[in-house]
Image (cartoon, rainbow, N blue to C red):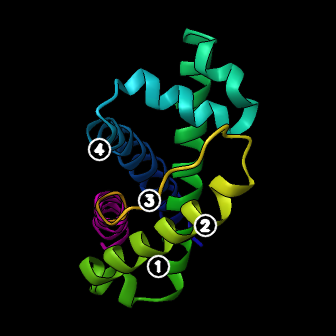
Amino acid sequence: MAESEFKRSASAILIAGIVAGSIDVGCAALINHAAPTRILQVIASGLIGRAALSAGNGSVVLGLILQWLMSIIIAAIYVVSARYKAAFLQRWVVAGFLYGTLVFAVMNFVVVPLSAMPFHSRHTLQGITLNLAAMWLFGLIIAFFARRMLIR
């Protein structure tokens, strides 16, 4: 991979991850009728348990770092895959929806259950629908930035 291709890929990963991760926090706040700072504390609780919910700004910062780190990793998987599968860039809307669905499944049925989070979401039809829609947006954002920054 040429240096300019590497720089474009790295930029796509970082920008897509940070934008998608930040918007995801906003979506979670809207869906759960909670402040974004509370959502970030809940994210931090996945690593440090119930203590994150009363740890103040330290757990908010930890939650933001974890959110961005996970989002950047998720974006990296997509961007690297898109380098090998042109359809991810050519049909980015469909690929973004499918990727968002995959991310939803992995997060809800693997990552969260294995985390230290002191509670787990109830899988109601409304909750699944709203959270799946948020993950579709997440996937679309990643696919959009991958296409925009990788196609020259």
Residue 139 drawn at (x, y percent): 37, 65
Disc ID at residue 82: 1
Disc ID at residue 8: 3
Distance from the alpha carbon under mark 2 to that under mark 1: 25 Å
Magenta stretch in the rendered image: 129-152
- Observer-side mark, 1 or 4, equals 4
Q: Do the residues labelled 4 and 2 touch (CB within 8 Å)?
A: no
Distance from the alpha carbon under mark 1 to that under mark 4: 30 Å
- Residue placed most toward the observer, 118 or 14: 118
Q: Is tag 4's residue or tag 3's residue first in the polypeptide sequence?
A: 3
Q: Is tag 1's residue or tag 4's residue first in the polypeptide sequence?
A: 4
Where is residue 101, by image quadrant?
Answer: bottom left
Looking at the image, which residue is at 43% across and 21% down? 37
- Residue placed most toward the observer, 124 or 133: 124
Q: Is tag 2's residue or tag 3's residue first in the polypeptide sequence?
A: 3
Residue 81 drawn at (x, y percent): 54, 78
Q: Are marks 1 and 4 in contact (CB under 8 Å)?
A: no
Residue 84 drawn at (x, y percent): 53, 86
Callout 1 amino acid: Ala
Distance from the alpha carbon under mark 2 to that under mark 3: 32 Å
